Image (cartoon, rainbow, N blue to C red):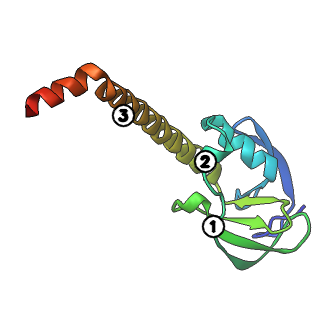
Amino acid sequence: MKCPTCKTDLVPTVRHKIAVKTCSSCQGMWFERQELDELEDEAFDFGEDAKGTLVFSSTPTTAPCPECNAPLRRFRYRLYDLEMDFCENQHGYWLDADEDTRVLELMKKEEAETKRKVIAEDQWAMTLKRMRKGSFLSKVRDLFH
């Protein structure tokens, strides 16, 4: 397998407990589909539905897929300010040096925001439940009588 940027051989490496292939020259990384999922799951455990769409739109590049040589496509990862490439034939994702760490940071941030939203929704549901109790409604009615 060759680096789509440098055309040098990719070498097996472990990044964040995941076996991936990296370029010893540019430090770019090839993540197969399931490997990117594993990386995200290191930080985000609410399930795929909570993560949102991975690719909304993409543009063609001249870089070839390391597995099938089809042109990779560039996209903004989950609409964040992180761009990466993917193979339309679903072989994997090309990440530049240290972008795997950025993916983990973004997933940790997303998980924290999701937890906050869940807590807020639970608190609002409890408030509505208390408001619907007869005692509360009768207190409100008494205010207007």
Kind of element beneath mark 2: helix
Query: From where the camera sits, is residue 72 visible?
Result: yes
Q: Please state the horizontal and vertical placement of residue 41, each as a whole percent of the image.
A: 68, 38
| Residue appearing at x 64%, y 57% in the figure | 53
Q: Which residue is mark 3?
A: 124
Q: Please state the horizontal and vertical placement of residue 29, each as a whole percent of the image.
A: 74, 55
Question: Residue 18 occupies which quadrant of the picture?
Answer: top right
Question: Gap between marks 2 and 3, in whole Å?
Answer: 23 Å
Q: Is residue 98 left or right of residue 29?
A: left
Q: Please state the horizontal and vertical placement of residue 130, each as a whole percent of the image.
A: 32, 24
43 up-or-down from 129: above or below: below
Q: Which residue is mark 1?
A: 56
Question: Residue 131 occupies which quadrant of the picture?
Answer: top left
80 up-or-down from 62: above or below: above
Q: Please state the horizontal and vertical placement of residue 79, each as a whole percent of the image.
A: 55, 62
Question: Gap between marks 2 and 1, in whole Å?
Answer: 13 Å
Q: Is residue 44 left or right of residue 15?
A: left
Q: Which residue is mark 2?
A: 51
Query: Foreground: 143 or 114?
Result: 143
Query: Foreground: 15 or 33?
Result: 33
- Location of the N terminus by quadrant is bottom right
Tell me the mark number nearer the camera, choosing from 1 and 3.
3
Q: Amino acid at mark 3?
A: Trp
